[in-house]
Every structure is written in C-alpha cells, then in structure tokens.
Amino acid sequence: MHGSGEGGINMQPKVGIILINYKDYAKRFLADCRDSLRLIDYPKDKYVVYIVDNATSPETRAYLQEIYLIRHTLQK
C-alpha cells in the first residue's frame, strides 16, 4: 500500500474501513475487530472506520459508542 510520490516520498492513501453490525453481533465480533485494527501498522490519520448499524437494540448502540469513538450517527 506504499507508493512513491514526487521526490521519492512514500505516499499512503487514505482508506475507509466499513464494518457491518446486524442485530446484536457487535458484542461478539466488533470488539475483536477493533482490537485487530489497533495492531495495524498504518497511520491513524490515514484511515477511518465506518460502522453500518442495522436493527440493533439501544443497548448495542450504547456498547458501540463505548468501544468506538462515534463521530456521527444517523437513524431513520
């Protein structure tokens, strides 16, 4: 994922990581995923994690806010 830009400087692209949560899978899977993402060797300012939350309980939404820094939430 490293490319050379002008002058031989390594340029790392910005990436988005999309995690899907359906019903109450967050407690079983997303905490492990978060822990794995913390171990990657990639600049923190070069990636953002998006959580698509579908059909969860209020308790699961609260849990997601505990394990991730949630910037924006949209409910319809």
Image (cartoon, helix red, strand yellow):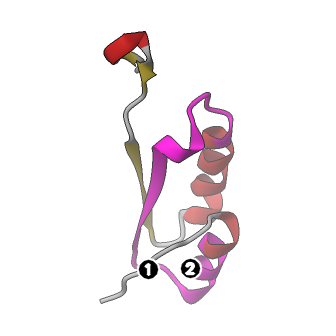
Q: Which residue is mark 2?
A: 61
Where on the picture, by quarter, is residue 63?
bottom right
Name the amino acid, label 2.
Arg
Q: Residue at x 48, y 42 (%)?
A: 46
Q: CA distance from mark 2 to mark 1?
A: 10 Å
Looking at the image, residue 14 lies above or below residue 55: above
Seen in the picture, residue 66 relative to 42 is either above or below; the reply is below
Q: Secondary structure at mark 2?
A: helix
Specify whether 16 is left or right of 24.
left
Image-based side of 71 in relation to 16, left or right: right
- Density class for disc 2 (Cα within 10 Å; few <14, some 14-19, many ≥20) is some
In this view of the protein, which residue sits in the foreground, 66 or 29? 66
Residue occupying image coordinates x 56% and y 79%: 61
Circles 2 and 1: CB distance less than 8 Å?
yes
- Report x, y in % for residue 76: 29, 89
Q: Position of residue 49 (x, y in %)?
A: 48, 54
What quarter of the picture does the N terminus occupy? Answer: top left
Q: Amino acid at mark 1?
A: Thr
The magenta stretch spans which residues?
38-64
Q: How many marks?
A: 2
Q: Earlier in the sequence, mark 2 or mark 1?
A: 2
Which residue occupies 38% across, 41% down?
15
Please, what secondary structure does the residue beneath circle 1 have? Answer: loop
Residue 61 covered by magenta stretch: yes
Q: Which mark is residue 73?
A: 1
User: How crowded is the residue under tag 1: few (<14 C-alpha within 10 Å), some, or many (20+)?
Assistant: few
Q: Is residue 40 inside the magenta stretch? A: yes
Q: Nearer the viewer, residue 4 or 37?
A: 4
